[in-house]
Amino acid sequence: MRYCAALMIILAILWGGCTTRKTNLKNIFRLNFSGGTLESLDPAFAKDLYIIWATHMIYNTLVETDDQLHIVPSLAHSWDISADKTLYTFHLRTDVYFQDNAAFPDGKGRKMTASDVQYSFERLTDPGTAATGAWIFHDHVCDTAPFRVVNDSTFQIRLSRPFPPILGMLSMAYCDIVPKEIVVRWGKDFRKHPCGTGPFLLGNWDEGNCINLLKNPHYWEHDSLGTRLPYLDGVTGSFTDSKAVEFLLFRQGKLDFINGLDGSFKDIVLTKSGDLKPEFSQKFDLQKHTYLNTEYIGFLVDTTNPIMTDAPTRNVLVRKAINYSIDRKKIARYFKNGTVFPATSGFIPAGMPGYDSTGKIGYTYDPEKAKLLLAAAGYPEGKGLHELKILVQDNYVDIVNFIVTELHDVGIPASIEVMQPNILKQQMSQSQAVCFRAQWIADYPDAETYLVVFNSKNPAPPNYTRFSNPDFDSGYYSCMLLEDSARWVQYRSLDSLVMSYSPVIPLFYEQLMHFTQKTVSGFRCNAMNVIDLKYVKVR
């Protein structure tokens, strides 16, 4: 209790409420959650990027994904996999303690054990929790007793069948480890009373205004010289919804970091190759990283759906023609200032094991081939085709308008219909969207997270196109029996099979654009855009 009281005093001194101004303690990192709010700090509900960022600061998982997409130890220092690949045994660190909390005896954090891991995973899958991350273990772990405590430092997961991506899934924020007594103490209010084993602990949170995190003085990780992490004294976050305003605050020195850039500033700040213009390179730094995100146009391909009766895209040759009609390089250069990679190698994005670096899988810009395909489909020069209507959110209208123009150039009548994102997602989920703009961001560092989109046994989401192919399904399940390198080869074959039916038009593979002040060092992230502030210093 004395610690909690002291914490509040420190917070009052540091921030005096909610503010982003500099304090006497210079080692405070200031960022903005441009979504406008945080819905929760409960990792079981870490469904969007900003909740993931915040929970990653407060909690730990059994394993982590480093900046090279390798699975590395975290709360588990090592693990064993049985010969049949269905039993995973994790050996836990014995020096990890939960953050001090008033709900613990004397307010002092206790040691984390295997029972906490079991509780966290059982809570995640408990229907009573209604967690957005409940799908993590669905259809992967045994129906009975999938989580087992061997002893305080040994924990086991038993799978129903081999599924190698499980390790990557365990690095997701949904799988953060929480203490039962704190969750029970707060119930549904645990969302704003988090307690984990991570490098930072919650100071105060004025929802929609700001959040302040403090250094966890008992954090278990150290750097290579033995210095306890994190280096920062704290993190303060604002909730400015506008990306344009966010950039202006960054230019004024009121933020230390921003993720991405508002479209209205791209031509001002960046060259056409995606680098900082000279006048800005002296003012702040730009880090570019691979981002496991594929932006695409999707087609509903379930021809039994009445909505598809007159749809031009029910014909695979028409879908292929559309794929060849789009100049992805122009989109990357003129609409994205060279900050993305043209998606000419299938649905699996660049940077992911299983990506086709040969360029043999996807589609390049070839309008003459598009015209030949239209003629082969029975629509020479587009004659007889019904208009293709592309459903799109308002922030992607410029790119899709360009696509519509290119379709017109080869004889394909097309138009756009602008929708609110939630309405578009609803239509996609109900298989009422014949053609739609969408994106797929990796949940974990395995290409299976992209191929699962086309598994016919899956509903929408993730199978928004309702793609169904028995050869694909068979290959999908059989590749889970393979070792990594062989599995990645199989992934490429499956991606190639999907692209031969063209249920999607991959447009570009995203690239992360992180801007930091010159005073910031040690900033890290991985290809899922999970930021790591443990090594950050602010001069």
Image (cartoon, rainbow, N blue to C red):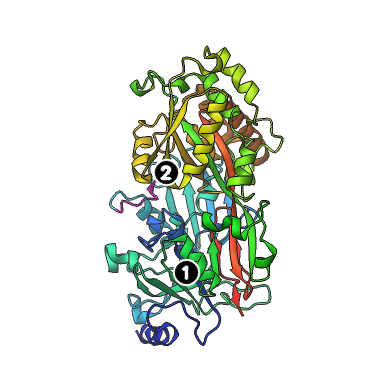
Which residue was labeled with disc 2? 393
Q: Quadrant of residue 380?
A: top right
Residue hosting label 1 = 197
The amino acid type of the residue labelled 2 equals Gln
**Is residue 53 among the parts visible in the rendering?**
no
Q: Give the position of the N terminus as an image quadrant.
A: bottom left
Classify residue 498 as left or right of residue 186.
right
* The residue stretch that appears in magenta: 129-135
State yes or no: residue 99 in magenta: no
Q: Tell me the mark number nearer the camera, choosing from 1 and 2.
A: 2
Query: From the viewer's perspective, is 485 left or right of 530?
Result: right
Residue 384, how many percent across, how many down? 46, 14
Helix, strand or loop: magenta stretch: loop
- Residue 119 visible? The answer is yes
Could you say which disc has been placed on residue 486 in the image?
none
Q: Is residue 107 above or below residue 334?
A: below
Residue 3 in the image: state x and y as whole percent: 39, 85
Q: Residue at x 49, y 67 (%)?
A: 57
Q: Position of residue 461 (x, y in %)?
A: 40, 38
Return the x and y of residue 349 as percentages of the image width and height. 60, 42
The residue drawn where x is 54% and y is 49% is 167
Residue at image coords 51%, 57%:
262
314 or 194: nearer the viewer: 314
Q: Is residue 229 left or right of residue 200?
A: right
Between 4 and 146, the one lying in front of the other is 4
